[in-house]
């Protein structure tokens, strides 16, 4: 398979995941974690759906990144519980 076909297949799989129909959600989530382009596509698909439902729900891409950065900082500040 060539790279463009792989990308298109991954976009289709991502769309299926959003619809609750993905065959291998765990693998696709790993791909999403490791591939910035796939994360951009994920956001775009959600943005399209949000705007179709309500223009008030449309948010810029960097809002998600800011949320994740804040979440990571808060998690880093959480105490680590050590089991005896």
Image (tube, helix red, strand yellow):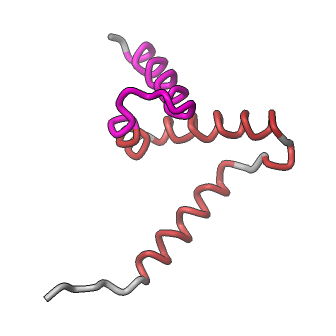
Pick whichever, 18 or 38, lies toward us.
18
| Magenta span contains residue 26 | yes
Magenta residues span 3-28
Residue 48 appears at what percent x and percent y? 73, 33
Residue 29 appears at what percent x and percent y? 40, 41
Note whether 57 is above or below 14 in the view shown.
below
| Magenta span contains residue 20 | yes
Pick whichever, 73 or 24, lies toward us.
24
Quadrant containing the N terminus is: top left
Note whether 79 is above or below 10 in the view shown.
below
| Residue at horizontal 13 percent and vertical 89 percent from the top | 84
Question: Which quarter of the picture shows residue 68?
Answer: bottom right
Residue 56 appears at what percent x and percent y? 86, 49
Q: How many marks?
A: 0
Question: Which quarter of the picture shows residue 79?
Answer: bottom left
**In the image: residue 55, left or right of residue 28:** right
**In the image: residue 3, left or right of residue 8:** left
**In the image: residue 16, left or right of residue 54:** left
Note whether 66 is above or below 82 in the view shown.
above
Question: Which quarter of the picture shows residue 76?
Answer: bottom left
| Residue at horizontal 75 percent and vertical 40 percent from the top | 50
**In the image: residue 41, left or right of residue 32:** right
Residue 58 appears at what percent x and percent y? 78, 46
């Amino acid at each position: 398979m060539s790279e463009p076909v792989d990308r298109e297949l991954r976009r289709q799989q991502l769309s299926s995941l959003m619809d609750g129909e993905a065959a291998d959600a765990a693998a696709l989530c790993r791909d999403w974690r490791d591939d910035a382009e796939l994360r951009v596509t994920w956001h775009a698909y959600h943005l399209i759906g949000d705007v179709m439902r309500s223009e008030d729900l449309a948010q810029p891409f960097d809002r998600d990144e800011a949320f994740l950065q804040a979440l990571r900082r808060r998690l880093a500040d959480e105490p680590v519980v050590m089991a005896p």
